[in-house]
Image (cartoon, rainbow, N blue to C red):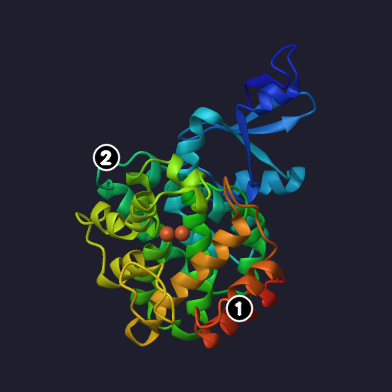
Amino acid sequence: MGATIPAGNGGDTGKQTMGSLFKVSPYMVIPSRVGGFSLFLKQEDAYVLYAEKGELFTEAHKERLARLGVDHLYVRAEDYRNYAGYLQENLLDIMDDEAVPVRERARAWNDATVSLAREAFETRLPKTMDKRSFARIRALITNSLRFLAREDALRELSRFISEGSDLYKHGIGVMVLTVSVLSSYVKEDAELMVAVGMGAMLHDIGKLELPPELFARRTDTLSQAEQDMIRSHPALGVGVCSSLPLPQEALQCILFHHEREDGSGYPSGASGELLPSYVKVVALCNDYDSLVRGGPNRKSLSPFEALTRIKSRRGGVEPELLKRLIAILSKAQIA
Ligand SMILES: [Fe+2]
Ligand SMILES: [Fe+2]
């Protein structure tokens, strides 16, 4: 331990200094791993350097944290990307570590996923997604399957993932729900789960090709041409992902996530018997997440209101799948 940073930035409010430091869990200190970020402890009015950037974490680090009863460590804003990268790299170990409380694992999962999804959605090259982001998303979903299949994971995750109407947050929400629902009946097919999870995460990426103000307006104020533009987002999404080695199932999820059981959806108007079950799960979870999340022109509904709304669209959804979603949400004590 050496350098200290005064909390309060030498006279400014503590809040301001906290703005440049992120709270992280002491459980994320994994012995024999190197962190590409400095870690700080808060001691009275100062942040004290606990581990230097590039330092190898050891058992002694961990023991000292336990001895001191440390609840939080802090990472500087400029190191946060490296911290998120560290979480992504070590996600499988963190998620499978039963010594780490589920809530701390959920927080780590959220931190790793949010930064990755934001990057994939916001820094992609024109018209196409960066291959590195794509590979990272695939690895993240692969490494998350076991955790997401736990009954208690969704409850803890929902604390973190239900806020905010950004597109990537909606993508994460739909992915988590989709994997939770699918886990209840196709758990053994990991390849399919990863493909569908990716499709769920990226399902709305085509919206980035369209003027954002279109999505900020109420549907009844849009001209026919504008509504048609909105309805083109699933096909645009497939275009954005065309240079990526995305499995067929993922592309189907992107293209058909607005289809309905009774054929009243778009773009193809295909009815239920033509749609694979996993596409219907994504479509249902998309509906549910959009309703509870709300948006610039829609207030967010409670889980109960959202489910009632979905049920009221008779014929729009396969009753068996809706039952599965309700079962998952009630086990997680969400609805
Ligand atoms: Fe959509
Ligand atoms: Fe969506």
In the image, what residue occupies the spot 43% across and 64% down? 143
Quarter-wise, where is residue 254 in the image? Answer: bottom left
* Type of amino acid under label 2: Leu
In the image, what residue occupies the spot 68% across and 44% down? 64
Q: What element carries label 2?
A: loop
List the single residue furthest toward the left: 243
Regarding residue 115, the answer to whether it shows in the image is yes
Question: Vertical placement of 150 versus 45: above or below?
Answer: below
Task: Look at mark 1 in the image and give the residue it sits on.
Answer: 311
* Type of amino acid under label 1: Lys
Check the picture and name the quadrant holding the N terminus.
top right
Q: Front-most of 165 and 152?
A: 165
List the single residue furthest toward the top: 11
Rendered image: mark on residue 125: 2
Q: Front-most of 265 and 142?
A: 265
Expressed as whole percent of the image width and height from the top left, the position of residue 278 reads 40, 77
> Relative to residue 279, is residue 17 drawn left or right?
right
Alpha-carbon distance for marks 1 and 2? 40 Å
Q: How crowded is mark 1: few (under 14 residues within 10 Å), some or many (20 or more)?
A: some
Expressed as whole percent of the image width and height from the top left, the position of residue 164 reads 59, 47
Quarter-wise, where is residue 22 in the image? Answer: top right
In the image, what residue occupies the spot 26% across and 68% down? 247
Rendered image: mark on residue 89: none
- Nearer the observer: mark 1 or 2; the answer is 1
Check the picture and name the quadrant holding the C terminus.
bottom right
Q: How many marks?
A: 2
Q: Front-most of 58 and 195?
A: 195
Expressed as whole percent of the image width and height from the top left, the position of residue 9 reads 69, 16
Question: Vertical placement of 112 versus 260: above or below?
Answer: above
Regarding residue 85, the answer to whether it shows in the image is no
Question: Vertical placement of 75 versus 330: above or below?
Answer: above
Q: Is mark 1 on a helix, strand or loop?
A: helix
